[in-house]
């Protein structure tokens, strides 16, 4: 490559990078619910219910004072009232429902007489009666008056940070916790922005340092992570131009591209610097390209195949993750063969002492013990794998010290429930007194189910205030002062609120089945169940089928590619041994660490298969080159000594890169990082232990 061509290539790439970089600012960030397919049955039922009972997004605010204190004390109630009134003035807040909206209702003649428990935030004379009212206890306030549950209806313009700032005005004896979809989405968005904008530059510097330890030259160490970072920027820019939305899955695109494809540049630079010991730097560039183009092409192709298996997922976000990472890997491969040689053409990187060096020998006592240990673990892995649970819980995606988890635990502890499950009933005419008996029977059967804290319905209001059901139906249409009735009845529709502390997918599905079995006994009401918890459980639908498909498609595609390239089935089978070992042990690690198989952990197997095959390809390419002059045992040993140090350096850099996820704000990324680091260590070990052993079998001396 001449210098004019090199300069032209760098100018074109720089201009394109600048244009795509401008588009990154237009990236959109999606909510957790966007991960769930719209055609999932629970999503359809939820949308159906919201057509009848229109509802804004809700924030649940838990406000608590000490056990020896009370929210019915004038000083406390007034402070809380003032903050709530200020909250109502914030943009994006549509409605706030709290203890200050509670009333002692009496029914005389044909009218309702509501008497508020508070006046301008100060408890009235009969305020303590609220603690005896079943309509409010367990729904708006706990039985001893120390904790209140405040429901805040919001739209998309709401600022969660403004709400937090407002809550800080409460006295020091108050504790506040917030949960609900808007809070979850806010935490997710902040985490996604960190992973998109902060982590890639940090990974770039981390890789730079690690590669310097290997290569001993700052300029040489800069090139691999630089081209990987630019490839990530290109991918984000293309995603923005395609108007794609980033979510908790697709936000990892940049991390995967930088961590995975930095090793391509490392292989190229390492090979160049080896040739630089004996050749002019332009000749070294040509030889490095000649040696590495096939192994790098295979590595990029097989890695892309591993990610492209995600296109078989029912989840759109996972399909986009696979496509975009595969695109980024392809771009990085192109940069490794074009941009890095262009830069090397313009500057001479002379070989230097490698600071991070490894001397590797095959068939040592350590390798024998390691191989024996891995074989034993493989043999007993079925005992672990059978215990893996396919389950998910949106609250488990957050760390234990997060606001959302604290709010969830506080709500469970105080009120006994977190997410509501609704039973929606429809009747041809209005609900009458004749329906009361049927509804009471239905509710009593639901209340004794495991996982049900209670059922809150129009019947509670009817009993508490001695108002007949038909009258409540009438008041819901004509009396705006009793607006909370619209939460339970709308025309010929009624809904029951089933209170449950359950949040994980399997348990909520089991409860749903039990509730559906009960309501099926009342076909005259055309009943169905709707719940955000059931919708969230949809994120895990088909995860086992997708996992099996991903593994077999990736394995088959990789094996076929290796057979086509190396033209020997035996060599291809030897090359896939490390990915088989790594994939099996990955599931064993999941079981040992008590991690569930769900949407975030389900991507691990495909990712690891695409990464680990890179090591097999480079070791096998070195073996084939050396086997032309040496017998199998010598060739495998020499290939191990030549390629092994690079594999270890690459594995260390990948492990270090993915370990950055340990510091990610969401627990799901922490779990992702742990499994990827363990998988890479296993992949490196199985490549360096099993492949030389298998390649050296049937050794016979060969003359030079």
Image (cartoon, rainbow, N blue to C red):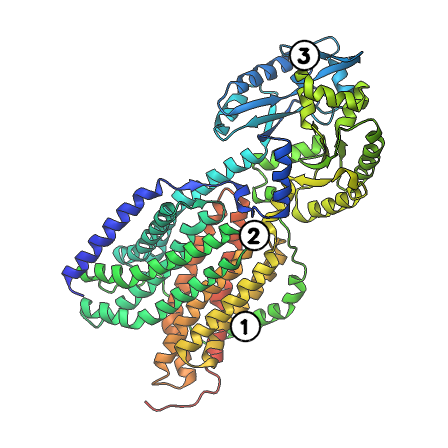
Query: Within 10 angstroms of label 2, few (less than 14), some, or many (20 or more) residues?
Result: many
The residue lying at 30 percent from left, 47 percent from top is 20
Position of residue 316 measured from the top left corner of the image (x, y, whole percent): 50, 51
Q: Which element carries disc 3, helix, strand or loop?
A: strand
For the N terminus, which image quadrant? bottom left
Asked whether the beta carbons under mark 1 and mark 3 sit within 8 Å of each other, the answer is no
Q: Along the polypeptide, which appears first: circle 2 or circle 1?
A: 1
Task: Kindly identify the residue that appears in the image at 27 percent across and 46 percent down.
Answer: 19
Please tell me which of labels 1 and 3 falls first in the chain: 3
The answer for how far apart the CA atoms under marks 2 and 1 are is 32 Å
Which mark lies nearer to you, 2 or 1? 2
What element does badge 2 sit on?
loop
Q: Gap in Å between the C-alphas at discs 1 and 3?
A: 73 Å
- Judging by the rendered image, the residue that carries numbered circle 3 is 118
Can see residue 130? yes
Which percent across, then down, holds residue 487? Answer: 67, 27
Please identify, in this view, whether the residue under mark 1 or under mark 3 is nearer the observer.
Answer: 3
Looking at the image, tell me whether mark 2 or mark 3 is earlier in sequence order.
3
Q: Which mark is residue 599?
A: 2
* Distance from Cα at disc 2 to Cα at disc 3: 47 Å
Q: Position of residue 590 (x, y in %)?
A: 60, 57
| Residue carrying label 1 | 371
Q: Name the residue located 52 percent from the left edge and 67 percent from the top edge.
A: 553
- Could you say which is closer to the camera, residue 139 or residue 463? 463
Using a 10 Å C-alpha cutoff, classify the residue at mark 1 as few (fewer than 14 neighbours), some (14 to 19) or many (20 or more).
some
- Position of residue 183 relative to residue 389, above or below, is above
Locate residue 289: give its quadrant.
bottom left
Residue in front for this viewpoint, 628 or 163: 163
| Residue 358 shows in this picture | no
Q: Toward the viewer: 100 or 194?
A: 100
Locate residue 691 relative to residue 598 in the image: left or right: left
- Crowd class of label 3 (few under 14; some 14 to 19; many from 20; radius 10 Å): many
């Amino acid at each position: 490559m001449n210098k004019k061509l090199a300069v032209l290539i760098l100018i074109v790439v720089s201009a394109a990078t600048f244009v795509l970089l401008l588009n990154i600012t237009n990236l959109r960030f999606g909510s957790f619910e966007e991960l769930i397919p719209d055609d999932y049955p629970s999503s359809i039922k939820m949308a159906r219910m919201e057509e009848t009972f229109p509802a804004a997004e809700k924030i649940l605010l838990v406000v608590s004072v000490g056990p020896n204190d009370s929210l019915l004390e004038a000083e406390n109630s007034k402070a809380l009232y003032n903050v709530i009134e200020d909250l109502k003035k914030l943009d994006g807040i549509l409605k706030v429902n709290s203890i200050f909206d509670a009333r002692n209702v009496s029914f005389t003649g044909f009218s309702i007489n509501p008497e508020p428990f508070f006046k301008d935030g100060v408890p009235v004379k009969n305020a303590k009666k609220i603690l005896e009212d079943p309509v409010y206890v367990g729904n708006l306030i706990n039985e001893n008056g120390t904790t209140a549950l405040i429901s805040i209806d919001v739209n998309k313009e709401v600022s969660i940070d403004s709400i937090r700032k407002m809550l800080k005005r409460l006295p020091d004896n108050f504790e506040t916790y917030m949960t609900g979809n808007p809070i979850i989405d806010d935490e997710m968005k902040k985490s996604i922005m960190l992973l998109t904008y902060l982590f890639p530059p940090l990974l770039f510097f981390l890789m730079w340092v690690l590669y310097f330890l290997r290569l001993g030259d700052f300029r040489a160490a800069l090139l691999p992570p630089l081209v990987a970072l630019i490839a990530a920027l290109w991918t984000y820019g293309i995603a923005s131009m395609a108007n794609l939305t980033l979510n908790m899955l697709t936000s990892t695109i940049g991390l995967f591209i930088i961590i995975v494809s930095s090793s391509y540049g490392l292989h190229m630079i390492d090979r160049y610097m080896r040739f630089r010991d004996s050749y002019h730097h332009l000749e070294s560039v040509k030889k490095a390209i000649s040696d590495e183009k096939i192994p790098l092409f295979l590595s990029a192709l097989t890695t892309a195949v591993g990610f492209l298996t995600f296109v078989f997922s029912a989840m759109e976000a996972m399909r986009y993750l696979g496509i975009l990472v595969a695109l980024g890997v392809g771009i990085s491969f192109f940069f490794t063969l074009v941009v890095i040689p262009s830069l090397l053409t313009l500057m001479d990187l002379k070989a230097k002492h490698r600071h991070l060096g490894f001397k590797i020998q095959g068939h040592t006592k350590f390798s024998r013990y390691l191989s024996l240990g891995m074989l034993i673990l493989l043999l007993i892995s079925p005992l672990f794998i059978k215990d893996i649970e396919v389950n998910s819980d949106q609250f488990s995606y957050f760390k234990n010290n997060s606001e959302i988890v604290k709010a969830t635990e506080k709500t469970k502890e105080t009120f006994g429930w977190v997410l509501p499950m609704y039973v929606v009933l429809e009747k041809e005419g209005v609900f009458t007194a004749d329906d009361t008996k049927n509804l009471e029977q239905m509710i009593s059967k639901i209340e004794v189910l495991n996982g049900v804290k209670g059922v809150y319905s129009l019947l509670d209001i009817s009993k508490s205030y001695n108002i007949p059901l038909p009258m409540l139906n009438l008041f819901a249409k004509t009396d705006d002062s009793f607006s909370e009735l619209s939460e339970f009845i709308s025309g010929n529709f009624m809904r029951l609120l089933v209170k449950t502390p359950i949040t994980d997918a399997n348990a909520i599905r089991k409860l749903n089945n039990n509730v559906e079995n009960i309501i099926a006994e009342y076909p005259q009401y055309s009943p169905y169940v709707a719940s955000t918890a059931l919708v969230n459980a949809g994120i895990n639908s088909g995860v086992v089928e997708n996992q099996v498909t991903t593994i077999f498609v990736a394995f088959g595609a990789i094996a076929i590619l290796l057979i086509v390239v190396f033209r020997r089935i035996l060599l291809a089978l030897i090359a896939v041994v490390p990915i088989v070992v790594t994939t099996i042990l990955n599931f064993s690690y999941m079981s040992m660490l008590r991690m569930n198989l769900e949407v975030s952990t389900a991507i691990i197997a495909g990712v690891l298969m695409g990464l680990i095959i890179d090591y097999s390809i480079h070791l096998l390419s070195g073996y084939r080159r050396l086997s032309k002059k040496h017998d199998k045992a010598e060739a495998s040993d020499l290939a191990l000594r030549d390629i092994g140090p690079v594999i270890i350096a690459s594995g260390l850099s990948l492990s270090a890169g993915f370990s950055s996820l340990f510091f990610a704000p969401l627990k799901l990324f922490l779990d992702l990082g742990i499994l990827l680091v363990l998988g890479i260590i296993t992949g490196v070990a199985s490549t360096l232990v099993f492949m030389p052993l298998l390649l050296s079998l049937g050794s016979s001396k060969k003359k030079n």
